[in-house]
Image (cartoon, helix red, strand yellow):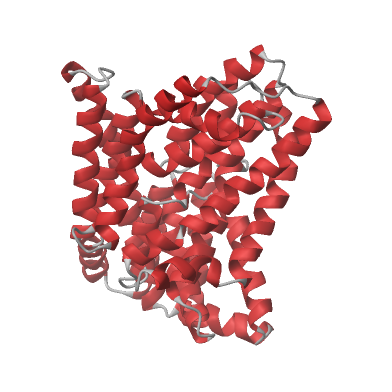
Amino acid sequence: METVAAIILFATFFFLLLFGAPIAIAIILSSVFTFLFVLPFDVAILTSAQRMVTGIDNFTMLAIPLFVLSGIVMNNGGIAFRLVNFAKVLVGKLPGALAHTNAVGNMLFGSISGSSVASAAAMGRIMTPMQTNQGYKLTYSAAVNIASAPTGLIIPPSSVLIVYSLVSGGTSVAALFMAGYIPGILWGIAVMVVAYFMAKKEKYPVSSLPNMKDIFYIIVSAIPSLLLIVIVIGGIVAGIFTATEGAAVAVIYSVLLSMIYKSLKLKDLPGIFIETIEITGMILFLITASALFSLVMSYMRLPEAISGALLSITDNQTGIILIIIFILLIVGTFMDITPAVLIFTPIFLPVAKNFGMDPVHFGMILCFGLCIGNMTPPVGSALFVGCSVAKVKIEEVVPTLLPYFGIVILVLLLVAFIPQLSLFLPRLFGL
């Protein structure tokens, strides 16, 4: 019975996706249909409805719309431009300096906004015209922007890590946030390494640094924006406030800072709130749908069955990790990261725990692997936004992106097989 139900669940899910159903709708319909197969009609419907409501009835979940709001405010509040100028100071003397500025800008703005799409859009709009004026190929500019945009999903504050914390049974958000720094920064550096060698090959120019007076002004003007990271993450790690309270602090700080910069006016707020509601509604709908999907899988003991199947292939930890990474890379190409985290965490986390893997370390592997899908077709949101901003076709950019795929996957393998890359900072801070 359980085997047949599992076949029905996944067959219905992929059938609906194949015929263009939105992923949340596909998740809900396949889950309800499977429940109707194994439970009486009234019990199946009532259980499904209750699970979808309780799936988002969590105080920590409130951090997601607040961080989304904070990111949108920053995207409209002139903060991205100041971070770009700061990034120029850091990498201005490297070959292909504007590409490195783009990558560092994505790491900084992405970590503050928590969105690869916001980063790709903001940095692309600022950097692409500048790079074009200095003779950079559009495909090169777009590829660097796309490849570095997802770093903001790993470098905290990150709503993806909050979702993983919830679905993994309460893994510390503070520990996950601290764990994200080294992997996220390594991703960004890896992109810069590829960009460096490409720039050397194409003989792209080295930017000249401004004078010391201008450098001082740029650094001082960027400090208030950078302080947001210190205040929010520092407060969460120190236990001064929760992740949700930290998100609220981020909103207040970003609104005040944007108004001080005179880049945001009160009349802009209704539009920002509407955009926040639209994005949050989409995310929470995916989460509530995935909560139902997870319940169906648990009812049919699918995580245990998949764990047993993996262990029957090999009992070698290295082999299991490689299989999981391969599956995550495939899943990331066609599924958005939020439902993927909700669906695959309960499947793979028990396998990881069976080998004694720390849930924080596994969370980094899972989220890192799925985030790569942001830069791959057919679902890669950073890919679509980056190409749209640069006004270049996806098929033209993908060949230039291939080296970035390779080096980012190499970083993923380092994160997977060197646990200290994820666990050093959480343990340093006693988390």
**Relative to 60, is 385 above or below?**
above
In this view, which residue lies farthest toward the right? 201
Q: Nearer the viewer, residue 342 or 7?
A: 342
Residue at figure coordinates x 55%, y 66% from the top left: 421
Tell me, yes or no, if residue 262 can be seen here: yes
Horizontal relation, residue 117 to residue 239: left or right: right
How far from the left and from the top, in percent, is residue 137?
72, 21
How far from the left and from the top, in percent, is residue 413?
65, 64
For the C terminus, give its image quadrant: bottom left
How far from the left and from the top, in percent, is residue 247?
24, 47
Residue at figure coordinates x 60%, y 71% from the top left: 418
Horizontal relation, residue 213 to residue 253: left or right: right
Residue at figure coordinates x 57%, y 58% from the top left: 369
How far from the left and from the top, in percent, is residue 323?
65, 71
Q: How many marks?
A: 0
Tell me, yes or no, if residue 33 can be seen here: no
Q: Nearer the viewer, residue 222 or 157?
A: 222
**Relative to 172, is 96 above or below?**
above
In this view, which residue lies farthest toward the top? 133
Residue at figure coordinates x 42%, y 31% from the top left: 219
Horizontal relation, residue 7 to residue 48: left or right: right
